[in-house]
Each structure stands twice: as C-alpha cells, then as structure tokens.
Amino acid sequence: MTDKDAMRERLVALALACVLAIAGCASVESPRRPNAVPEILPGLLQGYLAGNELPNSLRLLPPPPAAGSSAFARDREASRESLAQRGTPRWEQAVTDADLRFPAAAGSFAAALGFQVTEQDTPHLYILLRRTLTDAGLATYAAKNHYDRARPFTFNKEPTCTPEEEKLLRTDGSYPSGHTSVGWAWALILTEVVPERTDAILVRGLEFGESRVVCNVHWQSDVDAGRLIGAAAVARLHADAAFRADLDQAKAEVKRVAARR
C-alpha cells in the first residue's frame, strides 16, 4: 500500500467516525419543546386560526330540524333511547367526555391510540390538541348564536350528566355541538399522527360525539352537524403553516415514544 493509499484510508475512517458521532449525538438530542402559546381564556389556548379564518358554520349548515318534522322526531327518539343509559358505564363515559379541560382531556383517545398523550412525553401533540380544541369549538359559534337552539334537557325536563353546567348550557345554543366538533377534529388529526390506529381512533371519535346525546345536552342532529364543522376546521387547519409544523413534530415525537415501548 502506498503512502497515498494509506492517507486516503485514514481520511475515510476519520470522515466515517465524524458521521457516526454526529448521528449518535442526534439520536440522544432532546426533542425541541413547543413555543409558549397565550391563553384567550383561563385554560383555553389561542388556536391556530384567526376569527376570519374559521369555517363559517352558519353558511355550511342547514337550519336545525323544525318542530313537527321527521328530522325532529328522529332527534326525540334518539334522546329517549339515550335516557335509558343513565347510571350505566356508557353514562359514566359521557361524564368523562364532557370534560374538555387539560390535562384530563388529553387522555380522551388514549385507549384508541395505545398510549397516553402527555405534556412531558408528547408536548407537540399535547399542544396540538389544546389549540385545535379552540379552533374546532369556535367554528361552531356562527350557527350556535344564530339559531340559539334549546337543549334537549330543557325540552324533556330530564337531568343531564353534568348538572353543574346546566345553567351555562341554557344560554349556549345547542346546534351544532361544539364538543362533537372538537372530538371529531381530534379524531381526524390523530389518524394522521398514528395512521395504523385509524379505525380505533375514528370509532372513538364517533363515540365522543354520541356522548353528548347520552348526556342529554345535545340532540342527534346537533352531533351530526358538529362532525361536519370539525371536519371543516381540520381541512382549513391544513392550510396553516404553524399547524402543519406542529403536526410534523407530533408525528416525530410519537415515533420516539413508540421506539421506547
């Protein structure tokens, strides 16, 4: 071997060692934490979308079912059936699903995902859920405020699964369901983060909305309309660069969590 060949081998070995060292450092580097996001109300983070960027639920939805219509008869029947579940595990699930406060709400899809979403282990996914809650929830209010539909518990005089919220709900329009919009938006987003769990996530998203009927705080048509607005919010969010960046970070951190299991 000539001196020239020996020098070339040493340079190649040195370059390889540098590459391996860099890769090793990258593998143990702590994931970047998401930037702080201001609250618009206590516990409620600012969403990704400005008010004029939110889907307009009043334009997207038909009016709620009129009294005496076949659609309202369907609403009443679904309401009667749901009341029979009072005191069952399904009723208790509706109580849990009614709570959109964090960190409790971060566990809403844990069983479907196969892991817990936490601020420590999956900070980008955690903040993604918090911020999209605001977007999907606020997107329902153009129609809510316009129609000001009465809640089923004011109609059937039966209790709800969240009696402490009834005073507030009496002044908050029933159509469309904000909880359902949020839950369905979360389901659609989570299928992108964990696509191999799509079926379980979507089933859970459907159950999350149905919990509002079980809870006696929404009509079935409110829930159906809520899913449409949740889907519209997610479609619009994909045009937002900050949302896409957090979504990419969430996918990466979930892969890191999976690799540790």
Image: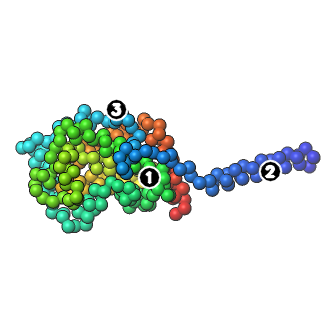
Q: Which residue is mark 1?
A: 126
Indicate the position of residue 73 as horizontal and vertical percent values: 10, 48
Please report the residue visible at 12 percent of the width from the left and 46 percent of the height from the top: 72
Disc nearer the start of the sequence (3/2):
2
User: Which sits in the foreground, 122 or 16?
Assistant: 122
Rendering quarter of residue 28: bottom right
In this rendering, position of residue 260 left or right of residue 230: right
Q: How far is disc 3 from disc 2 in space, using C-alphas? A: 58 Å
Indicate the position of residue 27 as horizontal and vertical percent values: 63, 54
Q: Which residue is mark 2?
A: 13
Q: How far is disc 1 from disc 3 in space, using C-alphas? A: 25 Å
Callout 2 amino acid = Ala
Give the mark toward the camera: 3 or 2: 3
Q: Which residue is mark 3?
A: 52
Is disc 2 placed on a helix, strand or loop?
helix
Please report the residue visible at 48 percent of the width from the left and 46 percent of the height from the top: 36
Classed neighbour count for the residue bearing mark 2: other residues with Cα under 10 Å, few (<14), some (14–19), many (≥20)? few
Q: Is residue 124 visible?
A: yes
Is disc 1 placed on a helix, strand or loop?
helix
Q: How many marks?
A: 3
